[in-house]
Amino acid sequence: MDEVNPMTLHTAAPQSASAASAWREWLVDHGPKLLLFARQQTRSHEDAKDVFQDALVKLVDKVRTGEFVGGQEAWQPYLYTAIRRLAIDLSRRDDRRKRREDSVSADSETDQYEAFHPWFEGDESDDETRSQLESRLKELPEKFSEVIILKVWGERTFAEIGETIGISQNTAASRYRYGLEALKKSLSTARRRGDLSI
Amino acid sequence: MKQDPPTLDGELRKLQSASLDDAFLARLESSAAGTWTELTRDELQFELFLRQNSPAGLSTDFLTRLESVTRNVHFTVNEKIVLFPKERGATGASKKYSTWAAAAAVAFIGAASALMLPSKGSNSQVAQNLSTAPAYSAAVPQNFVPASFNRGLSAVHDEGIVWKDNKQPQRLLRFVYMEKMTYKDANGRIVEVEQPKALYRLLPENTD
């Protein structure tokens, strides 16, 4: 077998290959929190994936044509905003469609499907805690849960959250505080009932 | 029963608007003081508890779907950012540069930035920097003397907003130059030296 010079391989590798690998790394790093936000904004796991993908297509088109203003650090804020807008559009379309369809059986199928695609994972918490957290987040008013997800898992500042949602940073902080308080209360109730061991 | 308008008006005037509750007053005070966005220790602790639950990773098929979207699209890397290689257990052979090399590059860029950026408290503008030409004598043969200098500003990029320690938003601007220095000797021979350069400036950004 011929010996392959790694240097030759490196030189011959097309530039697009390294770009693809860089994109992949970026997606592996930031994709989970963007998808989590998309899931909070949409009604199903599949919708969340579609919305996330559409937002990425918009970003990539802008980067490709040189229209995108700002560097790589501006990608995430752009994607959060795009995901939110696309989710709102999708929700409006779904509402119109739902008026025409009987959705009872579809909803129950969706619930079963969602159970196989939990929002969270991790070694530091148990399945029950993760499942309770997901349920309680879903029960919160959307305006609270979206801020919590952007702040805790999206690691956005209140100013950035304000820009994404179109509110002031003080309003973002208020929603975060009320949401956090409600979530804490809700999780404490679950703990008292024995549903949770935190 | 019918009341005539003047009587109703009088009754309404007797009513008073409800006073603000303590929590709302505290919130208004804190917002006015600019501290409402600072979290308490309890809130930070609860936030830490929540963070222990990581968002679920992307499935392989979905990641592949997303990757296909980015195919043939240049991955923009900020010039001021040097990528540190990630630790990979079994793929050491594919490592293209070492952590030490990246650290050295960061140190070099830091030193270069320190030379280019104005000192703290200085109000000097970029234009003032243009008046002094840098010395490229190391790259020029002996007996050649500087004849002309052109800073060659080619582009100004808005790099977006950055937040400094004092919570003051700053707009980061990148000025791109192609500096051109011409040297001449006694015989009229000319040596031209070109040097690409980027200079970063932070400008305070207005906030509402």
Image (tube, helix red, strand yellow):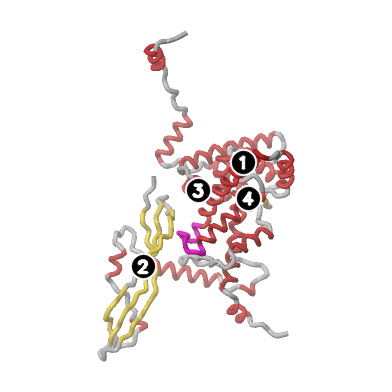
Front position among marks 3 and 1: 1
Q: Which residue is mark 2?
A: B116
Which callout, 4 or 2, points to the residue nearer the camera? 4
Range shown magenta: A63-74
Which residue lies at the image location 71% right of the left edge and 45% below the top edge? Answer: A110
Q: Chain of mark 2?
A: B
Disc 3 vs disc 2: Cβ atoms closer than 8 Å? no
Query: Dot 1, how many residues are within 10 Å of its Cα: few (below 14), some (14-19), or many (20+)?
Result: few
Q: Earlier in the sequence, mark 3 or mark 1?
A: 1
Q: Nearer the viewer, residue A184 or A78?
A: A78
Secondary element at tag 4: helix
Q: Amino acid at mark 1?
A: Arg
Query: Could you say whether the residue bearing mark 1 is in a helix, strand or loop?
Result: helix
**Residue placed at 69% from the left, 44% from the top?**
A131
Q: CA distance from mark 1 to mark 4?
A: 19 Å
Give the residue at x 72% y 38%.
A104
Q: What number is the disc on residue A48? A: 4
Are callouts 3 and 2 both on one chain?
no
Rounded to the nearest angstrom, the CA distance separating label 4 from label 2 is 46 Å
Mark 2 or mark 1: which is in front? Answer: 1
Quick check: marks 2 and 1 in contact, CB under 8 Å?
Answer: no
The kind of residue on which mark 2 rests is Met
